[in-house]
């Protein structure tokens, strides 16, 4: 009886998916993901890789700048950590 009602109301039937079609689509999507991952890795490597130095002075300055940036990041992190710990201190002032 339900098939008659479906035919009368023109309700579309859901598409039929076979195991083979699902496996094929899964393989296609996996390949797309791998290509996308490789493209993202290449882009990030191009963006964040250090520039090629032309001489030793540029190379030394590049290392100094990297050291200063690391020190600055560490000190900023410590300041933030101290401030956050201040919010959760045991000796609260009311």
Image (cartoon, rainbow, N blue to C red):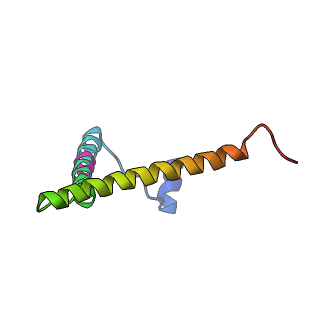
Residue 9 coordinates in the image, percent (x, y): 52, 61
At 66% from the left edge and 43% from the top edge, which residue is drawn? Answer: 85
- Which residue appears at 18% of the width and 56% of the height? 59
Q: Nearer the viewer, residue 87 or 43?
A: 87
Q: Say whether residue 54 is left or right of residue 25.
A: left
Is 26 contained in the magenta span? Answer: no
| Position of residue 52 in the picture relative to residue 43 (left or right) | left
The quarter of the picture where residue 21 lies is: top left
Pinpoint residue 60: horizontal percent, then vertical percent: 21, 55
* Residue 6 is at least partly visible in this image: yes
Chain part drawn in magenta? 28-33
Q: Residue 44 in the image: x percent, y percent? A: 27, 56
The front one of 5 and 20 is 20
31 or 2, nearer to the observer: 31
Residue 77 horizontal/vertical position (percent): 52, 49
Image quadrant assignment for residue 13? bottom left
Number of marks in the rendered image: 0
Secondary structure mainly formed by the magenta segment: helix
The residue depicted at 28 percent of the width and 57 percent of the height is: 48
Up-down relation of residue 50 to residue 2 (above or below): below
Is residue 49 visible in the rendered structure shown here?
no
């Amino acid at each position: 009886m339900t098939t008659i009602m479906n035919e009368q109301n023109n309700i579309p039937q859901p598409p039929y998916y076979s195991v083979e079609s699902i496996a094929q689509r899964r393989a296609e999507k996996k390949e797309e993901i791998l290509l996308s991952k490789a493209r993202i890795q290449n882009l990030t490597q191009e963006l964040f890789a250090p520039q090629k130095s032309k001489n030793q002075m540029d190379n030394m300055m590049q290392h100094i700048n990297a050291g200063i940036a690391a020190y600055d990041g560490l000190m900023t992190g410590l300041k933030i950590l101290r401030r956050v710990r201040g919010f959760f201190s045991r000796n609260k002032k009311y």
